[in-house]
Image (tube, rainbow, N blue to C red):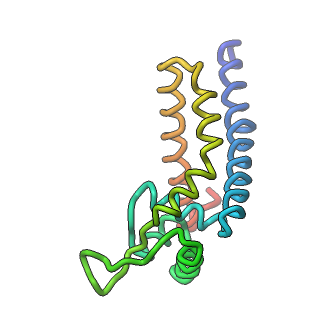
């Protein structure tokens, strides 16, 4: 292996073996702190993020989105309703069903909880060139896709290949 190849391999190893796992652990810890402050669970915070990103959805769709059984999702929705973060509304396409939608209060509380990190991240990215920002964004989107694929692979029973 040539020196440039070794340098590249070292960078990749540090990124996937140290930096990304370390960042992921801190994000999990931050989500736990936010959930505690909101009086809900970590998964409940994921639910609010999903509703904010994808809009109102049925309890079944929400359960799939945050990797819960429908029974667990019902309990999660009950907690979030009690916390004032979501509400159940009639499904506009089928009035026999309900959709879960975030309340403005719930979205505001989550956004407020993450506002410090958002501001710090904007500051951190301030010195990046446009090219570097595009590379970071490309990496995050690719990693998001790969992570979703790995979740699917592990859940489908083909986990140890």
Observer-nearest of 68 and 16: 68
Quarter of the view holding residue 69: bottom right
Please, which residue is most extreme toward the top here?
Answer: 3
Q: Is residue 45 left or right of residue 53?
A: right
Q: Position of residue 140 (x, y in %)?
A: 53, 38
Q: Which residue is at 70% across, 52% downward?
A: 30
Q: Position of residue 136 (x, y in %)?
A: 54, 30
Check the image and report above or below for 78 versus 135: below
Q: Position of residue 75 (x, y in %)?
A: 58, 81
Observer-nearest of 119 and 94: 119
Q: Which residue is at 51% across, 26% downward?
A: 133
Q: Position of residue 62 (x, y in %)?
A: 46, 69
Check the image and report above or below for 54 versus 97: above
Please, which residue is most extreme toward the left here?
Answer: 93
Q: Which residue is at 57% across, 78% downward?
A: 82
Q: Is residue 54 left or right of residue 11?
A: left
Quarter of the view holding residue 161: bottom right
Please, which residue is most extreme toward the bottom here?
Answer: 96
Quadrant in which the N terminus is drawn: top right
Check the image and report above or below for 112 versus 125: below
Q: Disc count in the image?
A: 0
Observer-nearest of 31 and 5: 31
Q: Which residue is at 57% across, 23% downward?
A: 126
């Amino acid at each position: 292996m040539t020196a440039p190849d070794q340098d590249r391999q070292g960078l990749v190893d540090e990124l996937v073996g140290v930096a990304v796992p370390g960042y992921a652990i801190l994000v999990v810890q931050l989500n736990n702190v936010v959930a505690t402050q909101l009086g809900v669970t970590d998964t409940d915070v994921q639910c609010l993020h999903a509703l904010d990103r994808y809009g109102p959805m049925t309890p079944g769709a929400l359960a799939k989105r945050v990797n819960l059984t429908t029974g667990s999702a019902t309990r999660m929705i009950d907690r979030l309703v009690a916390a004032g973060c979501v509400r159940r509304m009639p499904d506009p396409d089928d009035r026999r069903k309900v959709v879960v939608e975030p309340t403005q209060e719930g979205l505001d509380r989550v956004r407020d909880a993450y506002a410090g990190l958002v501001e710090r991240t904007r500051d951190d990215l301030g010195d990046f060139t446009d090219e570097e920002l595009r590379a970071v964004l490309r990496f995050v989107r690719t990693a998001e896709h790969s992570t979703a694929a790995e979740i699917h692979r592990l859940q489908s029973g083909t986990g140890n290949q």
